[in-house]
Image: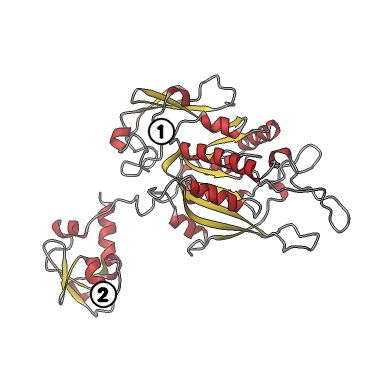
């Protein structure tokens, strides 16, 4: 991913990365994934001295300090740390354009009045904590815009944010996101496999919550790991409605009395999908409402770096213990294949000029309906159609578009056909 301030990888290579006080050397974008692979190290933009986290900051607990020396400015970022305190205050201490993704599960402002009982008169353990209570909608909106503004500041130019809510607040969240300049990519419906029943029988059972996925702005070249989402869904495109059970059983954190530790703990399967969809190993995900630490735990397991913010000391302590018990996946298991945009490209003309498919070669479709001749400039001709492999493929089929690599075949000696894309794959492997 392109850095927001330093620009190209060559520019960023001039800045040394410092982790835990040790110089890790310059970034040549070959870290972990090979010489020709995209760089997954965090690169941070410049800011004033008042924006950096200092070593004696009271918010830092067990942080791994990472900094950049470049452009005359040194910035520090507390990686793999749970920052204890108010989310807005903690966000203001982070450098701008420093995180790749954000997952936020803010207070829902449920506006619960009185106790809720089941038909057997037992008390429902509802969300009635002080952190979910606001005096009115105006107060909730002001709080929402304050933390979202800080999130947008610390989000990289090509980063994305996930904001989660229910019918009580998700519409207000959506308005705030758009007003602040975020660009909505999807609204994802988390359909709960085991929702809580509606005990009073006055409404439909509330069986889903909504996740708004947004880029920092309309100009963002955001990451979407399409192939990984497809693989996760049995090689079928991942839809925007996710059927995932509530957090129960051994995954649910409990206190010494056996009661659930956090009333709104989210399932790890949900965060697994979120993090896998929009980040690569080594990238940084921020959770400004960490709660019991689900985002941090899943990020650590998947080989991502995390920053968590939590105001409740009890939740923060539980999150740290939970993360410490997580065994990260091996580098191979955590690795995701590069997206098409990140893969190296090779023009058809390169195969022509290096003699792999010399001028005069014949291309045909699989059914041998059309025959095209390869020109010296990498164009092909089929009757009156002349142009690229893609344009001519579309023209002969009278189609709006065509991927010439998988449409055309090379006619070899003896009449056998070989898919054009196989020649490209071999050429890329030889680089």
Q: Is residue 394 left or right of residue 17?
A: left
The residue at the point 73 percent across, 38 percent down is: 130
Q: Nearer the observer, disc 1 or disc 2? A: 1
**Residue at the image point whose x is 28% and y is 65% from the top:** 405
- Residue at the image point whose x is 50% and y is 25% from the top: 53
Q: Does residue 41 appear left or right of residue 211 in this picture?
A: left
Residue 311: image x %, image y %? 65, 33
Relative depth, front residue between 142 and 214:
142
- Mark 2, other Cα within 10 Å: few <14 / some 14–19 / many ≥20: many
Identify the mark nearer the N-term, 1 or 2: 1
CA gap, disc 1 and disc 2: 48 Å
- Secondary structure under badge 1? loop
Residue 390 in the image: state x and y as whole percent. 25, 66
- Residue 28 at least partly seen: yes
- Find residue 214 and report its horizontal and vertical position in percent: 48, 50
The total number of labels drawn is 2
Q: Is residue 292 above or below residue 126?
A: above
Q: In the rendered view, does 167 fall on the left or right side of 126?
A: left
Which circle marks residue 44 in the picture? 1
Position of residue 344 measured from the top left corner of the image (x, y, whole percent): 29, 50
Task: Return the residue at label 2.
Answer: 365
Q: Residues within 10 Å of mark 1 (few under 14, many from 20)?
A: many
Q: Residue furthest right?
A: 121
Q: Of the numbered discs in the image, which one, if any, rests on residue 170?
A: none
Which quadrant: the N terminus?
top left
Q: Secondary structure at mark 2?
A: loop
Is label 1 in contact with label 2 (beta carbons under 8 Å)? no
């Amino acid at each position: 991913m392109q850095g927001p301030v330093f620009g190209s990888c060559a520019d960023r290579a001039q800045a040394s990365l410092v982790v835990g006080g040790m110089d890790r050397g310059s970034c040549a974008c070959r870290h972990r994934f090979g010489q020709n692979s995209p760089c997954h190290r965090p690169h941070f933009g410049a800011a004033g001295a008042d924006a950096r986290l200092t070593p004696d900051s009271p918010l830092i607990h067990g942080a791994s300090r990472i900094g950049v020396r470049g452009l005359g400015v040194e910035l520090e970022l507390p990686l793999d740390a749970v920052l204890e305190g108010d989310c807005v205050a903690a966000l203001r201490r982070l450098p701008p354009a420093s995180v790749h993704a954000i997952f936020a599960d803010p207070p829902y402002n449920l506006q619960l009045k009185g106790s809720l009982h089941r038909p057997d008169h037992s008390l429902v353990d509802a969300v009635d904590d002080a952190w979910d209570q606001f005096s009115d909608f105006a107060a909730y909106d002001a709080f929402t815009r304050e933390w979202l503004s800080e999130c947008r500041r610390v989000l990289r130019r090509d980063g994305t944010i996930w904001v989660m809510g229910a019918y009580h607040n998700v519409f207000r969240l959506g308005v705030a996101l758009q007003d602040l300049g975020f660009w909505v990519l999807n609204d994802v419906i988390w359909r709960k496999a085991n929702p809580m029943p509606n005990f009073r029988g006055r409404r439909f059972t509330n069986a889903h919550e909504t996740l708004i996925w947004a880029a920092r702005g309309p100009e963002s070249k955001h990451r979407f790991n399409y192939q990984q989402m497809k693989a996760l869904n049995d090689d079928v495109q991942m839809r925007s409605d996710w059927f995932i059970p509530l957090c129960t059983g051994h995954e649910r954190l409990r206190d010494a009395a056996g009661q659930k530790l956090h009333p709104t703990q989210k399932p790890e399967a949900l965060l697994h999908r979120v993090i896998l969809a929009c980040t690569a190993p080594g990238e940084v995900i921020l959770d400004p409402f960490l709660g019991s630490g689900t985002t941090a735990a899943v990020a650590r397991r998947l080989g991502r770096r995390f920053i968590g913010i939590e105001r409740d000391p009890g939740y923060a302590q539980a999150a740290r213990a939970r993360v410490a018990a997580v065994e990260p996946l091996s580098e191979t298991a955590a690795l995701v294949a590069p997206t098409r945009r990140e893969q190296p490209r090779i023009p058809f003309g390169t195969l022509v000029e290096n003699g792999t498919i010399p001028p005069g070669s014949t291309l045909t479709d699989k059914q041998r309906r059309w025959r095209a001749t390869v020109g010296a400039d990498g164009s092909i001709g089929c009757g009156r159609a002349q142009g690229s492999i893609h344009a001519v493929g579309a023209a002969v089929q009278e189609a709006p578009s065509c991927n010439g690599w998988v449409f055309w075949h090379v006619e070899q000696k003896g009449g056998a056909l070989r898919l054009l894309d196989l020649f490209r794959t071999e050429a890329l492997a030889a680089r």
